[in-house]
Amino acid sequence: MKKLDTKQLRKAYLDFFAERGHAVIASASLIPDNDPTVLFTTAGMHPLVPYLSGQDHPAGKRLCDVQKCVRTGDIESVGDATHCTFFEMLGNWSLGDYFKQESIAFSFEFLTKVLEIPVERLAVSVFSGDEDCARDEESAKRWISLGIAKENVFYLPKKNNWWGPAGMTGPCGPDTEIFVITDKEKCCEECSPACDCGRYVEIWNNVFMEFNKTAEGKFLPLARKNVDTGMGLERTVAMLNGYESVYETDVFRPVIDLLKQKSGKGEDFIRPMRIIADHVRTATFMLGDEKGVTPSNVDQGYILRRLIRRAVRFARILDLDSSILNEISALYVSLYGEFYPELAANKNKIADELAKETDRFQKTLATGLKEFEKLLGYIQNNRISGKAAFRLYDTFGFPIEMTEELASDAGVTVDTEGFARAYKEHQEKSHAGAEQKFKGGLADNSEATSRLHTATHLLNAALKKVLNDPNIQQKGSNITAERLRFDFNFPRPLTKEEIEEVEKEVNDAIQAAIPVVCEEMSLENARKKGAVGVFGDRYDASVKVYTIGDRSMEICGGPHASNTSELGKFTVVKEQSSSSGVRRIKAVLG
């Protein structure tokens, strides 16, 4: 096998597919466009869903890229040999161009000719078939024709060899997965790539999107068949070089070496070193992303804050000051800045935000850890109550996950259900108050506040359009009979021209006399329809979705006007800062 580092593998991959007619496209943002169901781009295909669903891509029918991705579902597993929160995915696509024959041939050629993996070390799996789709004999025959031994072709069911749809409906199809056969012995006579014994290590996955799953559960043939492939960069480099862990690759090794040098500690502390290396890398990419994420208590900002604070905690285990995070982040900017220029362009922002967040946390951490130690002295049944866990969160900024981790280290458990109840009670108190405010921030239920509330929906949509930022979200709202106040995430003051354009957008919608339509539906259906909502909140199973023509679609508790014509003239009276990264608009209807 050819030994390549990450830079060499990126180049080899993109060059290979460019030579075969694929347009090389840039990585999309870590923050997905127009997808309220996920916080981050989780796979290479994620930004291409509209084109896999039928739209024409401006770069053509053959594409390839290196996509930056974040997955946080396995955050507790970070520190083992393979798990990372941030990773890079190599991918190539055919949008209605070539299909199984060519896709498999490309993959085989790249693996055997470019990466120089011996054919006898390759195994593949294909779909075994069921009532929805026939057994994938075409893929199996193609692999065998290229030289894969028959005994190394495995037929596996849907749970192993089927992709999608991403939601309840949409494009999907069988896949063929490619594995490197290791030196480990078979675990049993039936040993296959479906085993977790370690004999087979996945290197690539080719998805053949040939069906559309309907709401009724039917699988109908797509008019345009697509290919979507994915190869994990770090994992492939580790495999090519015979590393036991992705943390031995060139992108992690300098950071691990720095942590060893600064801490004076060795392999006994490798797990905290790996966690710091992973979390700071992810935080650097989130902070440096072109769409901008900063630490907060909601959505992407909450995940970012959690990663930074976990890194601080593990730095303490190494007896290192939190300033080490900035040193590591600067190293990552240097390592990645050439391929991801947004990191170099935003290096000052990355450093400033990282320093601010670690400083915030340091101020409460020492006191909070002492409080935690005291708490251990008087808990009952080796269990931290929900109220005590909430106090650590509310007073000392400890995320519940951090309390759980500290508790696990001390051999005790946490009443997470009790924490959820205390958290919910706190939210309800915050939203109620003496004025008995509604969830939308209304002071009363009058016609005036209903009209202003409807105007906030139009304002939200107008801001996204005028500022060309689909990730703008409501961060707070307060409405009286006289005015509306609307907070939203944005990094700078609006210009006079932008404010005037926002006013025009809202007033155009008012003059268009658009009906305001309310539908009650499941949260899942609201997500599928593309309704705007902060999906991290605990919405009920059934929600109300208010639609204003093609201008706005939001999950909301009401009340609203019945038609935009009732609103009168919309005027912005003030635009100002609300908090770091959050702007505030005050407006009236006349």
Image (spheres, helix red, strand yellow):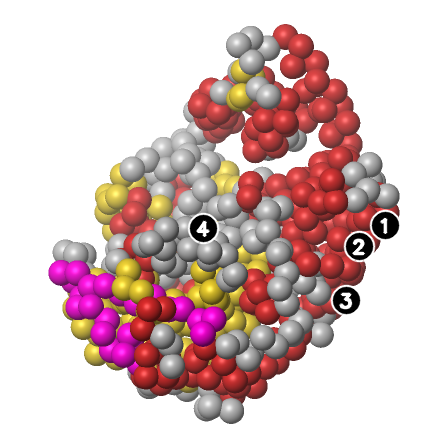
Q: Given this view, does label 3 or label 2 mark the residue nearer the observer?
A: 2
Q: Earlier in the sequence, mark 3 or mark 2?
A: 2
Q: Is residue 142 left or right of residue 368?
A: left
Where residue 179 appears, as percent x and y from the top left, is 44, 66
Q: Residues within 10 Å of mark 2 (few under 14, many from 20)?
A: few
Is 484 situated above or below 134?
A: above
Residue 197, label in figure = 4
Magenta run includes residue 208: no
Q: Secondary structure at mark 2?
A: helix
Q: Is residue 135 left or right of residue 139?
A: left
Q: Residue at x 20, y 64 (%)?
A: 129
Q: CA distance from mark 3 to mark 2?
A: 16 Å
Q: Residue at x 38, y 77 (%)?
A: 148
Towards the viewer: 461 or 218: 218
Q: Is residue 230 left or right of residue 297?
A: left
Residue 544 in view in this figure: no
* Dots 2, 1 in contact, CB < 8 A: yes
Residue highlighted by disc 2: 257
Q: Is residue 405 left or right of residue 214?
A: right
Q: CA distance from mark 4 to mark 1?
A: 35 Å
Towards the viewer: 340 or 296: 340
Residue highlighted by disc 3: 334
Q: Amino acid at mark 4?
A: Cys
Q: Amino acid at mark 2?
A: Asp
- The residue range painted magenta reads 120-142
Where residue 330 appears, as percent x and y from the top left, is 78, 59
Residue 261, label in figure = 1
Q: Secondary structure at mark 1?
A: helix
Q: CA distance from mark 1 to mark 3?
A: 19 Å
Callout count: 4
Q: Quadrant of residue 397?
A: top right
Is 266 situated above or below 327?
A: above
